[in-house]
Amino acid sequence: MVTSATITVEECRLAPKVLLHDHLDGGLRPATVVDLARRGGYDRLPADDADELAEWFATAADSGSLERYLETFAHTVAVMQTADALERVARECVEDLHADGVVYAEVRFAPELHLEQGLSLDEVVEAVLRGFAAGEAAASSGGGQPIIVRCLVTAMRHAARSREIAELAVRFRGRGVVGFDIAGAEAGNPPSRHLDAFEYLRGECSHFTIHAGEAFGLPSIHEAVAFCGTDRLGHGVRVMDDVVLPPGSRPTDSSFDGAKLGQVADYVRDKRIPLELCPSSNVQTGAVASLTDHPFNILAKLRFRVTVNTDNRLMSNTSMSREFMVLHRQFGYGWADFERFTVNAMKSAFLPFDQRLRLIDDVIKPGFEVLMG
Ligand SMILES: O=c1[nH]cnc2c1ncn2[C@H]1C[C@H](O)[C@@H](CO)O1
Ligand SMILES: [Zn+2]
């Protein structure tokens, strides 16, 4: 392992970061959950105090099972059922990402989960987009580096609304929605269940990503890339099941020369399909056994297009800066590595090409140059 000079979380906050995989309903401020529950009469929160609630989420999500991890979302989704609540949560999300030094983010959520009090799918998306715009405006007026936030609409993979949600993504294209995703319990709900939605999106020249290779293995990744034609993989960590490392390799090694890739892993790497890796979440859901075993470094050294993501800031008690720190401590990464992962992410964003390029040239590269001194 090559260890770079020690860096701090405060320095990580200064880095211009790009976030592609972050769930709106997984990133609420604990105090906002408490406040919205009180206002909306939701009385099933496991704790009424913000600190206790934060602790509860982090512990409950730490189960090692994706299904149990997902159960914790019942509480956040329950308090996001009105336009005002959705707008507030979206605005605070942008404020929090901005305070953490994120310059571009794609934040996802499942509109179909927010209809319990009579909102339509369009009203749900409109409320979230209003919140994002308000957050962006507040960030710009406060000085410092502006933030751009775009939305991905998610369909739940166990449900049957993916075509409708795909149409929603296309309807809101150009108004803040840049893509589509499927999420939820992976086992038993393969991506090909939603082929109709993906074929429709491809016909519309629209972008999508698929949660795959998290709780379930290689077949899920194979379907996502080969049958569905996904642009990116949400997590995708289990692409490792298709990689044979040289004997004696350890996850912290500085090279993996001689590694043998199977057909799916080869295809993912050849096509430069971005992996939206989320180190802390991957441990909590059991996608990897521990941080020590996380294949981030192996995949990075084998030149897969790896990106760093938060997944659910509330459930993992994390931020982009903290995920950088996790990787710094685990693998000794320095600024040149983080710049590479950030450029990977920006290249993989669903933002138009000219805007991606501008962010890379005018914001990301100069920002890391300052940190590299
Ligand atoms: O890591 C995840 N894997 C699969 N589904 C997830 C993950 N994180 C959040 N979700 C689900 C729960 C949310 O309610 C939904 C939409 O954001 O997406
Ligand atoms: Zn996710």
Image (cartoon, grey):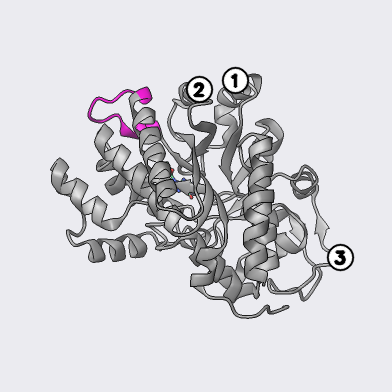
Left or right of 262, for residue 371: left
Quick check: is the Cβ at mark 1 less than 8 Å away from ligand 1? Answer: no
Query: Residue 242: x and y, percent?
Result: 73, 54
Query: Residue 230: x and y, percent?
Result: 65, 36
Q: Which residue is mark 1?
A: 200
Q: Secondary structure at mark 2?
A: helix
Mark 3 packing: few (<14 Cα in 10 Å), some, or many (20+)? few
Direction right: furthest residue: 258
Left or right of 178, for residue 300: right
Camera-nearest residue between 275 and 16? 16
Q: Secondary structure at mark 1?
A: helix
Left or right of 329, for residue 241: right
Query: Residue 369: x and y, percent?
Result: 67, 64
Quick check: is the Cβ at mark 2 less than 8 Å away from ligand 1? Answer: no
Q: Disc 3 to disc 2, how far (Cα)?
A: 43 Å
First in residue order: circle 1 vs circle 2? 2
Check residue 163 in the rendering and tell me which mark sits there, or answer none: 2
Residue type pointed to by label 1: Tyr
Assess whether mark 2 and mark 3 are in contact (beta carbons under 8 angstroms): no
